[in-house]
Amino acid sequence: MRIFETPLYPYERSPDQDAAAPARHPVVVVGAGPAGLAAAVDLARRDIPVVLLDENDRVSYGSRAICFAKRALEILDRLGCGDEITGDGVTWSRGRVFFRDRRIYEFDLLAEEGHRRPAFINLQQYRLEELLVRRLRDLQSEGRPVELRGGSRVTKVEPAADSVLLTVETPEGPYRLEAEWVVACDGAGSTVRRELGLEFVGQVFEDNFLIADVTMKADFPTERWFWFDPPFNRGQSALLHKQPEGLWRIDLQLGPDVDREEEQRPENVVPRLRQMLGDDVEFELEWISVYTFQCARIDRFRHGRVLFAGDAAHQVSPFGARGANSGIQDVDNLVWKLERVLRGRSPDSLLDSYDAERVPAADENILNSTRSTDFISPKSETSRLFRDAVLNLAETQPMARPLVNSGRLSLPHVVLDSPLQSPDADGLPGRTRPGSPAVDAPVDDGWLLARLGDRFQLLAVGIDVPDDEPGLEVVGLPARRHPLLDERYLGGAPGALYLLRPDQHVAARFTDYDPERIAAALRRASAQETDDS
Amino acid sequence: MTRLRTEPNIPDGDGFYEELLELHQGRSKEESDSINARLILLLANHIGDREVLREAMKAAADTGL
């Protein structure tokens, strides 16, 4: 039995189902996809009791997310499963672009050196989910307070004064739960969102896409191939992408108004794939599905005690791998805030910053994926004219290649004006300015991000700082020993101090040591600052 | 502050205009449209200044019909 057919967390009766009154839990996470699993793992690591509900009892089926970008891998490192996930993935950097019957150019995305993790890996979503479930089980066996309840479908969500009542349907009938906080990770068709009557606002794209996963019998280069208007799929596009275990992802744009059933028949798919891959390539179909998508989000991601993350909060087109990657980043932003609020260390207004920081990130992702979609699938005669002009030029004119948009790699969102940030110091490198995730760099025999934890910390490079900063862990490193660290954190400065949040984002930075200003920045970064006087 | 040059700037304007027409001589509407699109992209890349390009797009749209 293959992994996506294996019940990993079959339904079991919970004592909550026999309780006289709804059992109260600090956090209930709805949905065990990438975002929900990451949320549960992060909460459990922080010893926050969490119940994760999933209507299913196994990992996702079929072709879903495939490409995981560096920031997501770094977050998974923090969650304790980055090695397994990165190790199982395929890395690639070369690609080819075809237009009609011609190969117009090739590219090599040379990754910047000095990072523990590659720019991205390809890995089946079900494999990522499986590894996250395994991590969750390990935490459970260490005695961390996490429960994964399969076969448990949320059907009703009722916000109350200081909690949320959830009705959960199970094979043995419904029961109710009381959650202090609900993290809704129940996907694009979110029940929680519907129950709260929240609108998903945006653009629906009418194009259908067929995804097929195939196993190749022979060697095929580890490259990403993208076709615009190819002979085997006239007027449409196609994508070929490698996954681990000899599996390849094929994406064929079908256009609007197609007979989905008819398109999915192997006798219709196979000849097309043969044309695409060449007659001498032997392959086997794993599965085929047809999907459509929309680029949309809800107005706010925090609605009282319900926090939306991942596709439940926002949906993007698949171009640019921004779905699962942004869901994992949502969770990274949210969980430490939830922990502080639950422990009474910060007021619940800290959670408003989740909204303030992740809504612009979602908008950036929607913008990028909409632009890719408009390039791949031009909506008017004129947009097709320019699209084709770009592709024609790209064959001989390097100037046109950056305009070819078959998906833009997901890069972490830099928060430009978060309420948690302090004004920047002068003269330090732009890429580590407040609002950026800490940039990795080689440090001694290891990596900077591995040195950073998941609490508030002060990264001191070339500046001596007493070890007893209240509420802060100090990570001290010398200047002028690690060239890439200097380049990324000092620029020309002799030393610098970085206040890093528990999600390893820069909240403030300074070029000299002033405990007062550090304390003020910390209060601000944890929403404890109520006045500026 | 406008940066798009709107004073005459092409030496031998009549000669340039003739070359532009020659480029399209004997071509179908479809071919001409494609050439124009490529020409816009090449020139835009050469200019490279987003503000100038924005002003040119606006001037083109605001003039005429």
Image (cartoon, coloured by chain):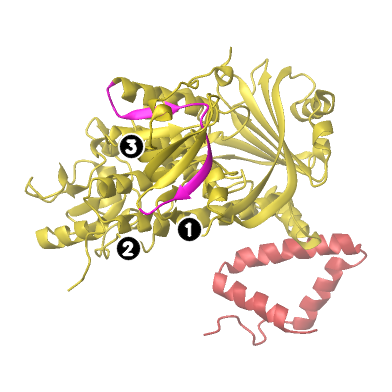
Q: Colour of chain B?
A: red
Relative height, residue A195 to residue A383 (above, below): above
Q: Which residue is mark 1?
A: A300
Q: Which element carries disc 1, helix, strand or loop?
A: loop
The CA span between labels 2 and 3 is 24 Å
Marks 2 & 1, CB-CB < 8 Å contact:
no
Marks 2, 3: nearer the viewer = 3
Q: Earlier in the sequence, mark 2 or mark 1?
A: 1
The answer to which quarter of the image holds residue A339 is: top left
Protein chain holding label 3: A
Residue B64 appears left or right of A347: right
Q: Which residue is mark 3?
A: A43
Question: Is residue B43 in the magenta section?
Answer: no
Q: Which residue is mark 2?
A: A419
The spot of residue A3 in percent (x, y) is 55, 18
Q: What's the residue type where badge 1 is placed? A: Arg
Q: What's the residue type where badge 3 is placed? A: Leu
Tell me which segment is drawn in magenta.
Answer: A142-161
Q: Closest to the observer: A404 or A202?
A: A202
Residue A86 appears left or right of B23: left
